[in-house]
Image (cartoon, rainbow, N blue to C red):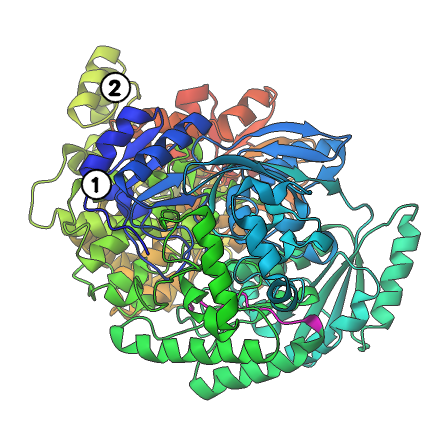
Amino acid sequence: MTRVSTVTGTDVAAALRAAVDGEVDDSDRRRAEFSTDASNYRVVPKVVVAPRDTADTLAALEVARGLGVPVTARGAGTSVAGNAVGTGVVLDFSRHMNQVTELDPAARTAVVQPGVVMSDLQAVARPHGLRFGPDPSTQNRATLGGMIGNNACGPHAVAYGRTADNVVSLDVVDGTGRQLTAGAGKGALDAVPGLGELVRGDLATIRTAMGRFGRQVSGYSLEHLLPEHGTDLAKMLVGSEGTLVTVLGATVSLVPVPTAPVLVALGYPDMPTAADAVPALLAHRPLAIEGIDARLVDVVRRHRGPAAVPELPAGAGWLLVEVGAEEGESAEDVLARARALAADGGTAAAKVVPAGAQAAALWQIRADGAGLGGRTPAGAPAWPGWEDAAVPPERLGAYLRDFSALMADRGIDGLLYGHFGDGCVHVRLDLPLETPAGVGPSREFLEASADLVAAYGGSLSGEHGDGRARSELLGRMYAPEVLDLFARTKALFDPDNHLNPGILVDPRPLDADLRRPHALPTPARRGFAFAEDGGDFATAVHRCTGVGKCRADSSAAGGFMCPSYQATKDEKDVTRGRARVLQELTNGSLVTDWGSPAVRDSLDLCLSCKACSSDCPTGTDMARYKSEVLHRTYDGRVRPVNHYLLGQLPRWTGLATAVPVLARLANAVLRLRPLARLVLRAGGMDPRRQMVTFSEDRFSRWWRRRTKAGAAGTARRLVVLWADSFSETLDGAGARAAVSLLEQAGYTVVVPEENACCGLTWISTGQLDGAKKRLSHLLGVLAPYAANGIPVVGVEPSCLAVLRSDLVDLLPDDPRAQMLADYTYTLAELLTAPAPLGPGEDWAPPSLEGVEVVAQPHCHHHSVMGWDADAALLVRAGASVTRLAGCCGLAGNFGMEAGHYDVSVAVAENALLPALREAGPQTVYLADGFSCRTQAEQLAGRHGVHLAELLGGNR
C-alpha cells in the first residue's frame, strides 16, 4: 500500500532546493502546467523539479523517499494514458537532461539521457546512416525516457520492433534507492534480490500469459526474464511506466536508415476489409503497414487544405505499406518487391509511390492523425482512454467489425487509424466527459471495450501503456494470478509504492481524477463569442489535449508555433502550458483569479502570433484566449500604460499624422535618442527599441491627389483597396504599390473615403469593447462593397486576419461580418484566383527572373489566410524564394513592451536574423507585415518590402 505523507509542498520544495542544483518550482502556475499530460487526467503535484544531471536526480529521489513523497518521471508529457502525472514530485527530464552523450557507429549504439527528444537522436545518428527504429508520431517532441516508460512503437515497429527490442541496457534507480545497470544475461536477475526466485516460481504463468503477440504491452513484460528470451532485465523494465525504476540513462541500438523506400497505397471498401489483407502483406517483409480511414483523410483535407492530400486509390479505407531495400538489393529490386506486395493486397486499387514529396505527403496524413483525431468529423471533442488497443494482426479485421458495432450501439464516434501491421488501432472517442453525468456511460463503454479486446486475445494497450486509463481494467485481460505476479514484482523494486503510485499495481479507478468533467461552464461575456465552442470559454481552452506539437520545432515543416517556447524551452511559454493554466482557471481550484500572477506569467510571453490556431491540430487559439483573459481581467479597471499607448496605437498615430507638419515635428523630436528612450520608458516600452516613424504623407492624401489628377483606372472590374491604420499612418508604400499593381492587372481600384480601423491593437491587449466599436464602424465602411460582390483587398496581413477570423467571433450577430469575411482577400489570393474574380491567365505578374528573395510570411498571414497563394505568385513571376518559418519576434506590440526585448531578439534568431545575415546585398527581404519589416530594420538594418512593392519593381 502507498505510504501516506502529510508533509506540505512548501516543506518538500525547501528540502529539494537545498539538495539539487536544478530548478525547483512549487508555484501554482508550474503545478498547473504539470497537472496533466496528454491524457484525460488532472493530478496536481506538490512540486516540479528539473534536474540538471544524474546527481541532481539521485538527490531529488533521496529527498522524496525520506519525506515519503511519491515521484513521477516525465519527459515531454505526451502520455495519453495518464502515466506522467502524480501527486508528489514530478521530475522533468526534458529541460536539462536531454543529450545524446555517446554514439558508436561501428557498434550501432547510442547512449542517451532520459530527456533527449527522439528526433534529436535521429539527427545525430543520420550522418552515420543510422536511426533509432521505433518512431511514434510524436517523435519530434517525445523523449527517449518516455518511450522507454511506455514501450513506444510507431509505424516501423513491424520491421524494427518496440522500444524494448531496441534497448541494450538501462542505468536506473529503484524505489529503494538501489542503483543498477540493467542488462541481459545470466546475472541479470541477481541485480534485484528475490527476482530470480519470482521468475523461477512462476515460469508457467509467465510463459502462457505474457508475450503472446508483439503488441502485448499491458502490464509488466515479464517474458523478457525467461531464459529462452535472454533473461533481459532492461527489456523487462521497458514499459513499466516509471513504477519500478527511474531511468537515469540508456544505451540503445540503432539500425541502418532504409534506402530506396517505396510506398504502396492500397484501397479497400472499409477499414475492416483493409485489415483482412494484412497477414498476406506481412510475408513481404514490409517496413510499415499503416491503416487510415476516409473520414481521417477528409479531416486532414479540411485542416491542411485539399492540396495537402495527394490522390489515393479508390476506397474508403487504405493501407500505406512501406518497403525498403534489404542487403544487396537495388532500387529496382525494391520496386519489384513493392509491386509484388501490391499484387498480394487483395485489391485492384493500388498505387506504388517511390520516395519523394508525394510519399511524404501520404505519410503526413497518417502523422496528422495523432492530433486531428482529437476531434470527431463533426467537430466534437474526442478523448483518449481507448486509443491504442491491439489484437493479433490475423484477428484485426474481425475485431474492427465488432468494435465499430460496439461504438455504433453506444452512440460513440471516433476516427480509426493505426499500426495495422502490428494489430494496433488508434482512436479517440467522443465520450461524454464534459459533465459529471457522462462519466458513468464512459466507464461502461471502456469496460465493454476491454472485454471485447480480451475476447480477441488482445492487449488493452498496444504502445501507450496502461496508466490511469487502463490499469483498473487489467483484471479483464489477465487472470488473478497474473495480477498477483505484477504486485509481487512491484514489491521487489518499490516496496513502499513510492514510484508513480496508482499505475498498474493497486491502480486508481479509471474514472478518478478526470480533468474535463470538473471544469465549470464559463460563458462568453461581452468579449469573444467562442461560437465554435458552444459559447463557452472552458470548452475552448479544453481544445488543448496535450499532444504537445507546440513543443516541437515545426519550422522544418513550415510551422510557426510556438515562438516563445523555441526561445526559452520552458513549459510556461508553450501553448500547452498556457492552456493548462487556463484550464485550471475554469475549474476554480488551483488558479482562481483571472488576474492572478499564475495567469499573468503564463500569458506574458505569448506573442499572440495565432500560429497555434492553425499549426495545432486541435485549433487551440491562444491569441484569442489571451485577449479574452485580458478583457476580463481589466474590465472596468485601470490598465497598464502600454495598453493605452500601444493598445490604442492607431488613435495616436492618427493624431500625429493629422497634418504633415505635426508628423515631421514628431519624427524630428523622436530621432533624439535620449528623448526617445524617455518616451519609450514612460510608455511601458523597452528603451532599447526605436520609435516608429510617422507618415508625413498619409496614404489617403496621396490617393486624393492621384484621383484629382485623373490617374484612376477605368476597367470594369472593381476592387476595394483597404488601407488599414498602419498603411494609412505609418508606412503607405505597400498600399501605393498595390494600387498600381491592381490597375496593371485590369482592375479599377476603389479606396473608401473614410478610413476604417480593424481594432487589432485593441484586440491584442484585450480591449474588446473598443475593438467592437471599431469593427462595427469598419463594417459600415466596407460591408456595402461586399454586399455588391466587390472584393476587398487588404494590405497589412494582421489586419486582414482580423476580418477573416476575429471579426466574426466578436460580432457574431451581425450578418455583415461573415459576408465581409467571405469577400476579403490578400493581394496574392486575388491575383492568383481564376477569372472572373482574378485577372485570369491573360495576365502575368511582372518578371522577377534572377531575383533572390528571403520571404518572412507574417504569422497571422500563415495562420489565418495561408501563404500558398503568395508562394505560387512568386514562382509564376520567376523569383528564387527562401521562405522562412517562424515568427519575426516583434509580433505587433509584444516586442516593443518592456520585459520582452530579449525574448523578441531570441525569437528573431530562430530564422529571421540568420537568414538576413546569410543573404547577399542584392537579396530582397519580402515582408508584408509592418512588424516584420520593423524588426528587420531595427535588429539587422535591413529594409523590407511589401509584395506589391516587389512586383512593382521597388526592391
- State whether residue 169 is above or below residue 895: below
Tell me where residue 642 sits by quadrant: top left
The stretch in magenta equals: 382-393
* Residue 586 marker: none
Instruction: Give the alpha-carbon distance from disc 2 to disc 1, as whole Å.
Output: 40 Å
The image position of residue 372, as x and y in percent, is 50, 62
Instruction: Indicate left or right for 700 with 952 as reference.
Output: left
The image position of residue 394, as x and y in percent, is 72, 75
Q: Cβ–Cβ below 8 Å for labels 2 and 1?
A: no
Considering depth in this image, is 615 or 804 the residue closer to the camera? 615
For disc 1, the marked residue is 9
Instruction: Indicate left or right for 215 with 106 as reference.
Output: left
For disc 2, the marked residue is 687
SS label for mark 2: loop
Considering depth in this image, is 524 or 4 the residue closer to the camera? 4
State whether the magenta stretch is mostly helix, strand or loop: loop
- Was residue 222 drawn as part of the magenta stretch in this picture? no
Residue located at (33% from left, 71% from top): 433
The image position of residue 652, as x and y in percent, is 19, 35
- State whether residue 531 is above or below residue 853: below
Name which residue type carries label 1.
Gly
- Was residue 383 drawn as part of the magenta stretch in this picture? yes
Q: In terms of sequence position, does the residue under pointer 2 or pointer 1 come before the other?
A: 1
